[in-house]
């Protein structure tokens, strides 16, 4: 595993939601806010294993996908 911190330990979900809602001028009604928080927490849980993959620093993306 890499040294990437677990997002759910250092990432403030509620603060992120507040900041993004303000940035996007997107009101989040109080009755759906708990669902939005749970969705963002699920996204973090899904992304975490990918973020923990160590990639070499000299890796280059392929210019085109060839199956």
Image: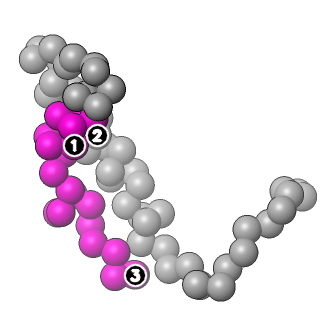
Q: Nearer the viewer, residue 31 or 61?
A: 61
The picture quadrant where one finds residue 7 is bottom left
Q: From the viewer's perspective, tell me whether residue 58 is left or right of residue 66.
A: left
Q: Residues within 10 Å of mark 2 (few under 14, many from 20)?
A: some
Which residue lies at the image location 14% right of the left edge and 40% below the top edge? 14
* Horizontal and vertical percent position of residue 32: 18, 18
Relative image position of residue 42 (x, y in whole percent): 31, 43
Q: Residues within 10 Å of mark 3 (few under 14, many from 20)?
A: few
- Scheme of image coloration: one colour
Q: Is residue 19 above or below residue 34?
A: below
Q: Secondary structure at mark 3?
A: loop
Tell me, for residue 2, which label it has, or none.
none
Q: Would you place residue 10 above or below residue 59 in this image?
A: above
Residue 29: horizontal and vertical position, in percent?
Answer: 15, 14
Dot 2 corresponds to which residue?
A: 40
Viewer-proximal residue among 38 and 25: 25
Q: Which residue is mark 3?
A: 1
Per the model, the C-alpha gap separating discs 3 and 1 is: 26 Å
Front position among marks 3 and 2: 2
* Residue under the image location 80 percent in, 66 percent down: 62
Contact, CB < 8 Å: mark 2 with mark 1? yes
In the image, is 59 to the left or to the right of 11? right
For marks 3 and 1, the one nearer the N-term is 3
Q: Nearer the viewer, mark 2 or mark 1?
A: 1
Judging by the rendered image, the residue that carries numbered circle 1 is 16
User: Is residue 31 shown left or right of residue 50?
Assistant: left
Q: Which residues are magenta?
A: 1-20
**Can you say which quadrant of the picture contains the C terminus?**
bottom right
């Amino acid at each position: 595993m890499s040294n990437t911190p677990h997002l759910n330990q250092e990432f403030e979900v509620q603060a992120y939601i507040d900041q993004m809602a303000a940035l996007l001028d997107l009101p989040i009604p109080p009755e759906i806010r708990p669902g939005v928080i749970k969705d963002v927490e699920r996204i973090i849980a899904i992304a975490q294993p990918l973020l923990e993959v160590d990639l070499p620093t000299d890796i280059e993306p392929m210019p085109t996908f060839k199956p």
